[in-house]
Image (cartoon, helix red, strand yellow):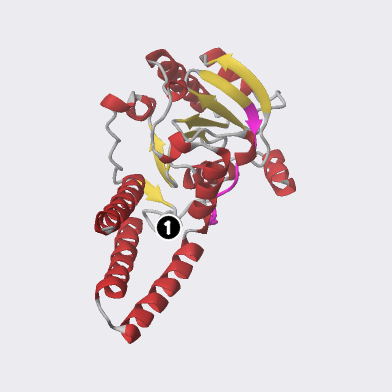
Amino acid sequence: MNFGWLINLRFLLDILFASALGILLFSRVNEPRTLWLLRGYLFLVSLAWFVNRFANLPITSKLFDGLVLVCSLSLAILWQGELRRLMELLGTGRLAVLLGNPQKEFQASTNTVSFLTDAAGRLSQNRRGALIVLDMGSDLRPEDFLYPGVPIDAQVSSELLLNLFAADTPLHDGAVLVKGNRIVSAGVILPLSRQTISRYGTRHLAALGITERFDRCICVVVSEESGTLSLANQGRLERPITSSRLLDLLKEFLSPPASKVMPKVSSSNLSISESSNSLDGNPRPQKGISSSTHNKENLQ
């Protein structure tokens, strides 16, 4: 019996699955340097597979296998946070996050965007520190935080946000988690950024930290010292911004996927690697939040 068709079918399935995995990886990578590394690694793997399968070159094949192994170990060290996140998503069955298909619960209405902007603007005017995490499809769960906070499960409103961040309330030092049109929890303690930036306070470092780990969430930050408004996204912080600029950004980020156009990073955006130096070369230290928050972070 001729099994040639079966061999050809396995070969086609192999190519199909490998191509699908490559397309999925490329669609989930937004950082240009990371994309270049991934392209180079996949090209090296493809070349090693071609030499092993079609060329009778034992020494060259061994060299390619060793080179792929070394590059794999290097990428595992470089992307340890991302690989850890991938295993967490696979282990918890959050395949929609991997496929980049946010559910309806993550889509915010126009009223919610207006409430968030209004509350942030009033907090900024009163110089009351605030940190609001907006989940756009990362499906953030209690185990993703240092402390999951206190469950709220209430409709988003300006008045409720102002009350949660009032100075005499027990939850004002932590972050507020918002999914869609509802406030999920308050008093959430976020992981800090992996890179220490002395000119930022703990609130800003926490906003950078959570957006480094989860690419489908953003953070609105209000500085307690200066009242400056900031927006963190994918480990980058845009500051200072006005209330109107914040409204435009929230509309673009939280709009439905069919009509969403990701906002361009303006020249005022400061990435983690760039923000250690100020624009004028004279960075001004910023306390960010009260000492009670620093103590709470240290305890965590």
Q: Is residue 237 left or right of residue 168?
A: left
Magenta stretch: dominant secondary structure: loop
Comparing 185 with 202, the one in front is 185
Is residue 229 visible in the rendered image? The answer is no
Q: Which picture quadrant has residue 173? A: top right
Q: Residue at x 69, y 42 (%)?
A: 291
Is residue 252 visible in the rendered image? The answer is yes
* Other-residue count near label 1 (Cα within 10 Å), few / some / many at <14 / 14–19 / ≥20: few
Comparing 142 with 95, the one in front is 95
Is residue 104 shown above or below 3?
above
Q: Which residue is mark 1?
A: 273
State yes or no: residue 281 in magenta: no
Q: Percent position (x, y) of residue 178?
A: 53, 25
Q: Percent position (x, y) of residue 23?
A: 30, 48
Comparing 136 with 132, the one in front is 136
Q: Percent position (x, y) of residue 249?
A: 35, 30
Identified by mark 1, the residue type is Ser
Is residue 255 shown above or below 298?
above
Q: Residue furthest bottom?
A: 59
Q: Is residue 181 left or right of residue 189?
A: left
What is the span of residues highlighted in magenta in the rendered image?
Answer: 186-198
Q: Residue at x 66, y 42 (%)?
A: 146
Comparing 51 with 71, the one in front is 51
Q: Secondary structure at mark 1?
A: loop
**Which quadrant does the N terminus fall into?**
bottom left
Q: Is residue 114 left or right of residue 154?
A: left
